[in-house]
Image: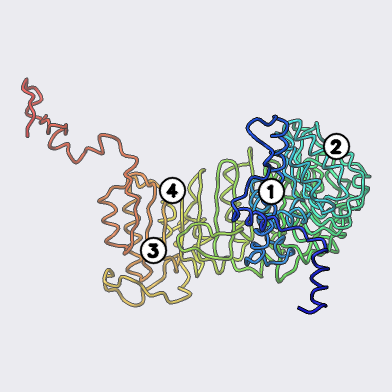
């Protein structure tokens, strides 16, 4: 060995040795079988010495456990999920959060150290406060740091501790991005005292359940310091915000419901608010339109209208027909993509003339009159009012199409003359663009719609394929036949607008080609009758009408009978000889017990053991015995 090498070895021998790796030391000791780290401890050592030795061993154990966890952490980091960037992992965690529960916390922060560090380092993950457990709500408020908060709370059922936690979160109004509170009168002061600016607030919803009819609350002029530059969605129920408030500007969604009898705006105030919202997409005004004087019976057309070219949904509720018409006359919509509309009017103080004015105003709305094709129409006439809904799609089964109707009328009445309901229904439907109507569903609880109304309103529609009627059908069946006479005048159907081939040519009797077609409802192929009574001549009239349509090559393809009275199995079998597809629920309703057993009356009454004969020749006999 050279001198340099010897010198190097000598310096290495005198240099301090590095700390041994705990795991290496543990392995070395195991190989030497020398695990007695404290030889000074014997069976006769003092308790203090034993306790000291145990603490030393505990420290060694924790050191080894930390080393093992470090190795596990390094191993987990090599897995596919462990290699994801923290930004992507936190994004995934955001999809796991649930505002209704806290169980998601264990799923993201109790898995490993890395996941917990990422979860705690993502303030947005904790920004949706859950008030069901107040302790956790306070902790989430801390973990969210300066992220915009989402506060949704129903204070009408919460415990006092929960309410206090909600009040505490409201003090952070400068951080709140979405605020939705339903509150009673006890917590209203906390709402009214929100006078700080809300720079992040984009959605605000305040509602009171209205346990007392006169319970309404007015927000002060300095509410939110009248400054919420990002506010785009505002909903107020039984809360009133002054109509000239700067908060009523640049909104995309506005819903005002029952602000109070003294809080309804003037027409100038309402139009001023709408002018400040050129991007408005949803507008709902419930009992919040300008009030018209009771003596007003006609309306003048304004010289200009407020354009709402971006409006997609328009709801007017709980106002008179004239008040609704007066507002519609002052607005204009985009003719290419106008809003879906729902109009709910109170009819107690309205007349047929008032409704005529309203329907004329609605007809001027371009989205109703021209851009959408009416395919399905549902009409319900009841004791409390009438509802008319229109869709631009058609469902063959007769059920309402999925999705929201593009037009909905809701006329409510208590003392309104119900005899006028049929006239109002017919006038409203005739005002709609029904030329392309394919499906009609009509339900009535008051009285049967007369044949004259059926013919004048629906019978000439060229594409009406399906009718679903709930209620008496005698008048409709009469309209389906050939000879329809009203007030002594025979009604002449228009010629068919299109050629429809029949399904069951074998059922038709030979007739001249000149009599083909020529019946009302020229395109009708599907008929659904529900809750109708076939007592008397109703069933025979239906058979005659169906046969006539077969002979005129305008036969029905499907006939559905549901919950019908006085309809037997034999009757349905006769109908199947006329219509190729008859669906019946099998219910024989409306028969008395005597009628249901009429088929057995000539033999006697049936009992479990057989028939008991009681013929006329044995009425005076003392012998009563069963015959098997």
Comes first in the chain, label 3 or label 4: 4
Between 538 and 365, the residue placed more toward the observer is: 365
Question: What element does badge 1 sit on?
Answer: loop
Q: Nearer the viewer, residue 572 or 432?
A: 572
* Residue 64 in view in this figure: yes
Give the distance between the C-alpha atoms of the residues marked 3 and 4, in whole angstroms: 20 Å
Labels 1, 3: front one: 1
- Label 2: which residue? 190
Location of residue 67 by image quarter? bottom right
Q: Residue at x 54, y 56 (%)?
A: 378
Neighbour tally class for label 1: few under 14, some 14-19, many 20 plus, Cα within 10 Å? some
For marks 1 and 4, the one nearer the N-term is: 1
Residue identifier under label 3: 482
Real-space Cα separation, disc 2 to disc 4, in angstroms? 57 Å
Q: Which residue is mark 4?
A: 472
* Spatial separation of the CA atoms under disc 1 and disc 3: 63 Å
Earlier along the polypeptide chain: callout 1 or callout 2? 1
The local secondary structure at tag 3 comes to loop
Disc 2 versus disc 4: nearer the observer: 2
Q: Nearer the viewer, residue 270 or 87?
A: 87
CB under 8 Å between callouts 2 and 4? no
Q: Secondary structure at mark 2?
A: helix
Indicate the position of residue 342 as horizontal and vertical percent values. 67, 54
Locate residue 432, reporting x and y percent: 62, 62
Q: Tag 3 or tag 1, which sits nearer the N-term?
A: 1
Where is residue 247 shown, x and y percent of the image? 88, 52
Q: Comparing marks 2 and 3, which lies closer to the viewer?
A: 2
Please indicate whether residue 198 sits to the left or right of residue 492 in the image. Answer: right
Please give the name of the residue rendered at 42% of the width and 50% of the height, measured from the top-left corner: 530
| Disc assigned to residue 99 | 1
């Amino acid at each position: 060995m050279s001198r340099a090498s010897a010198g190097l070895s000598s310096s290495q021998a005198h240099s301090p040795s590095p700390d041994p790796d705990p795991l290496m030391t543990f392995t070395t000791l195991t190989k030497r079988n020398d695990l007695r780290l404290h030889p000074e401890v014997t069976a006769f050592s003092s308790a203090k010495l034993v306790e000291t030795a145990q603490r030393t061993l505990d420290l060694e154990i924790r050191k080894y456990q930390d080393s093992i966890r470090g190795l596990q952490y390094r191993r987990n980091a090599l897995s596919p999920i462990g290699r994801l960037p923290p930004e992507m992992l936190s994004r995934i965690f955001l999809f796991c959060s649930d505002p209704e529960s806290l169980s998601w916390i264990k799923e993201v922060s109790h898995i490993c150290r890395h996941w917990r560090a990422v979860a705690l380092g993502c303030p947005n993950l904790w920004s949706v406060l859950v008030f069901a457990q107040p302790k956790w709500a306070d902790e989430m408020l801390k973990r969210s740091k300066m992220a915009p908060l989402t506060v949704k709370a129903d204070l009408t059922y919460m415990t006092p501790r929960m309410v206090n936690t909600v009040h505490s979160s409201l003090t952070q109004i400068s951080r709140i991005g979405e605020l939705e509170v339903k509150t009673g009168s006890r917590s209203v002061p906390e709402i009214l005292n929100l006078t700080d600016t809300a720079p992040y607030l984009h959605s605000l919803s305040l509602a009171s359940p209205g346990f007392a009819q006169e319970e309404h609350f007015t927000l002060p002029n300095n509410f939110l310091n009248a400054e919420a530059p990002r506010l785009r969605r505002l909903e107020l129920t039984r809360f009133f915000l002054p109509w000239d408030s700067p908060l009523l500007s640049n909104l995309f969604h506005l819903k005002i419901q029952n602000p109070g009898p003294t809080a309804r705006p003037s027409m100038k105030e309402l139009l001023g608010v709408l002018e400040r919202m050129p991007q408005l997409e949803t507008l709902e005004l419930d009992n919040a339109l300008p009030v018209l004087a009771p003596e007003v019976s006609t309306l003048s057309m304004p010289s200009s209208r407020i354009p709402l070219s971006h409006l997609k949904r328009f709801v007017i509720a709980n106002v008179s027909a004239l008040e609704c018409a007066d507002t519609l006359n002052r607005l204009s919509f985009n003719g290419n993509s106008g809003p879906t509309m729902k109009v709910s009017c109170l009819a107690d103080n309205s007349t047929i003339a008032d409704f005529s004015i309203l329907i004329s105003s609605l007809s001027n709305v371009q989205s109703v009159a021209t851009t959408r094709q009416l395919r399905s129409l549902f009409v319900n006439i009841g004791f409390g009012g009438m509802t008319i809904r229109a869709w631009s799609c058609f469902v063959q089964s007769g059920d309402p199409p999925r999705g929201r109707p593009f037009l909905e009328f809701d006329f409510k009445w208590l003392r309104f003359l119900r005899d006028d309901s049929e006239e109002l229904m017919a006038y409203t439907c005739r005002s709609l663009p029904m030329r392309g109507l394919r499906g009609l569903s009509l339900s009535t609880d008051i009285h049967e719609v007369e044949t004259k109304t059926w013919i004048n309103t629906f019978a000439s529609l060229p594409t009406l394929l399906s009718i679903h009627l709930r209620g008496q059908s005698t008048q409709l069946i009469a309209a389906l036949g050939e000879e329809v006479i009203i007030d002594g005048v025979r009604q002449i159907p228009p010629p068919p607008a299109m050629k429809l081939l029949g399904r069951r040519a074998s059922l038709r009797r030979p007739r001249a080609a000149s009599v083909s077609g020529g019946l009302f409802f020229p395109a009708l192929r599907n008929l659904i009758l529900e809750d109708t009574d076939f007592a008397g001549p109703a069933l025979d009239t239906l058979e005659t009408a169906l046969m006539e349509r077969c002979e005129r090559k305008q036969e029905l393809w499907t006939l559905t009978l549901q919950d019908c009275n006085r309809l037997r199995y034999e009757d349905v079998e006769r109908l199947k000889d006329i219509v190729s597809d008859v669906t019946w629920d099998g219910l024989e309703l409306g028969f008395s017990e005597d009628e249901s057993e009429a088929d057995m009356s000539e033999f006697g009454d049936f009992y479990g053991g057989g028939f008991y004969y009681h013929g006329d020749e044995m009425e005076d006999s003392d012998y009563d015995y069963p015959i098997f």
